Image (spheres, grey):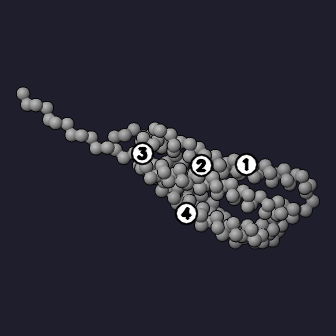
Amino acid sequence: MRQRPVSILIFGILNIGYGLFSLGMVLLNLASSHLSPKGNPVAAAMKSDPTMATWTSLSTPLSVALGLALMAFGIGLLLLKNWARLGSIVWSVIDIVFVVVGSMVVWPVMQRAMDQIPNVPHGMVEGFLMFGMVLGVVLGLAYPAVLLFFMTRSNVIDACQPEQPQPEQPPPPAV
């Protein structure tokens, strides 16, 4: 039996957890999209923005698909399957692109929405917005980047390769 590297165990479990978290966030976003933004001018501006509506309609099904795929890759990693390692690499690349594109789409929408806040100094809003976006991008890129790094290590690649059948040993000569 092959030895399972600790990184495969950790990332298998993390993939399952991150996939479940992703699906939970989609459900939370869908539930909150039906709330009325009457008293919140920022929420009203974001809800009425056509760019945000388009991004949401595209990113929601993609997030569901990526979350389900990541859960499957996590289970596959725990079973030492090479398709799960390769899928985790593909997921990492897709998620990195998803985070970068998402931040470029959401940034101007957030700026326009934050302009709707009355009686708040403009520089303060910009500072908080910039801090939040940088934090979101860094946290959004951290897991896929680390997963990509570990799934390309030689010990992980070797552990996920199919086992070669062992040649049968001839029986010892009878004495």
Q: Where is residue 26 in the image (x, y as percent from the top left)?
A: 62, 63
Label 4 – label 1 distance at C-alpha? 25 Å
> Tag 1, which secondary structure?
helix
* Badge 4: residue crowd in 10 Å (few <14, some 14–19, many ≥20): some
Instruction: Give whichever of discs 4 and 1 has the lower sequence position.
Output: 4
Residue pointed to by mark 4:
65
**Quadrant in the rendering for residue 3:** top left
Name which residue lies at 68% across and 54% down: 100
Amino acid beneath label 2? Pro
Residue 6, percent from left and from top: 48, 39
Q: Which residue is more in the foreground, 131 or 166? A: 166
Dot in front, 3 or 1:
3
Q: Where is residue 21 in the image (x, y as percent from the top left)?
A: 59, 56
Instruction: Provide the residue designation for mark 3.
Output: 160
Report, in whole angstroms, how far the alpha carbon at label 3 lies from the one at label 4. Answer: 24 Å
Residue that label 2 marks? 144
Q: Can residue 3 be seen in this view?
A: yes
* Within-10-Å neighbours for mark 2: few <14, some 14–19, many 20+: many
Q: In which quarter of the image is residue 110?
A: bottom right
Q: Could you tell me the amino acid type at mark 4?
A: Ala
Q: How far apart are marks 3 and 1 (CA)?
A: 34 Å
- State the CA–CA distance, disc 2 to disc 3: 19 Å
Query: Is 105 rendered above or below residue 148?
Result: below
Label disc, if present, on residue 135 of the rendered structure: 1
